[in-house]
Image (spheres, rainbow, N blue to C red):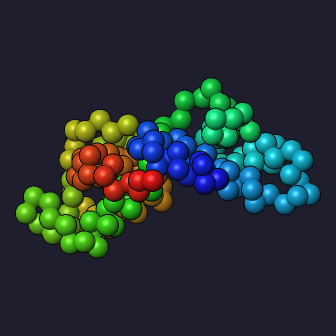
Amino acid sequence: MNTLRTTIRRQGLAGGLLLAAVLLLALVASIPAAIAADPEDRVRQILEDASTGGTVGLYLKEVNGPVIAAHNESFVFEPASTIKALIHFHAMRQVQDGAMIDGDVVTLDRLIPWFMDQTGSCPDLTTQGFDTLQNGLTAMMVPSDNRWTQAMRDFFGDANINATMPRA
């Protein structure tokens, strides 16, 4: 697991997919020995039980080793969902540090722009509105609203978010 963590840190933002693998590895590791004989089936069942109707999948590979478990491995999933934790961490670090953006302090009450008119996974960026950072972070994390993920990336900047990532 330490090798996997070290690899994620070295991969940067592109290692977001590996972050998902770490979370799944923790899930597989927590399966009781009695049902660990077929962990792929058990993890698939857990994912399907937790699903709200969408496609579920996993791809768990040992670093420099074999694939441990896979389900819907050829389905293209939106990698932004694996990056949201880093974006949220970066935002909270900016609040904690009292960072300044465009001459104003970053607080949870700070109004930031976002695009309100798209309900799918990719915002079309036409109808701009404003809401608090706190509401945006909640919407990004709880219902996984990709409009807010993009708004956070635009507000904080990808280079700044990448710089927050821990390095080995």
Residue sticking out furthest to the left: 103
| Residue under the point 22% across and 52% down | 155
Q: Give how far across and how far down residue 166 sits, in percent.
A: 41, 56
Q: Is residue 132 above or below residue 56?
A: below
| Residue under the point 52% across and 41% down | 17
| Residue under the point 29% across and 35% down | 124
The quarter of the displayed image where residue 60 is located: top right
Q: Is residue 145 above or below residue 75?
A: below
Is residue 6 visible from the viewing direction of this image?
A: yes
Instruction: Give the left or right position of residue 41, taking residue 23 as reference.
Output: right
Q: Is residue 35 above or below residue 107?
A: above
Q: Give how far across and how far down residue 129 sits, in percent.
A: 21, 53
Instruction: Give the left or right position of residue 38, taking residue 101 as reference.
Output: right
Q: Give how far across and how far down residue 33 sits, in percent.
A: 88, 58
Q: Nearer the viewer, residue 70 or 145?
A: 70
Instruction: Give the left or right position of residue 14, taking residue 135 as reference.
Output: right
Instruction: Give the left or right position of residue 27, taking residue 75 as reference.
Output: right
The quarter of the displayed image where residue 76 is located: top right
Q: Which of 11 and 13 is in front in this view?
A: 11
- How many marks on residues? 0
Is residue 116 visible from the viewing direction of this image?
A: no
Q: Nearer the viewer, residue 91 or 122?
A: 91
Q: In this view, does 16 lie above or below 98?
A: above
| Residue under the point 31% across and 52% down | 163
Q: Nearer the viewer, residue 149 or 95?
A: 95
Q: Give how far across and how far down residue 37 sits, in percent.
A: 90, 47
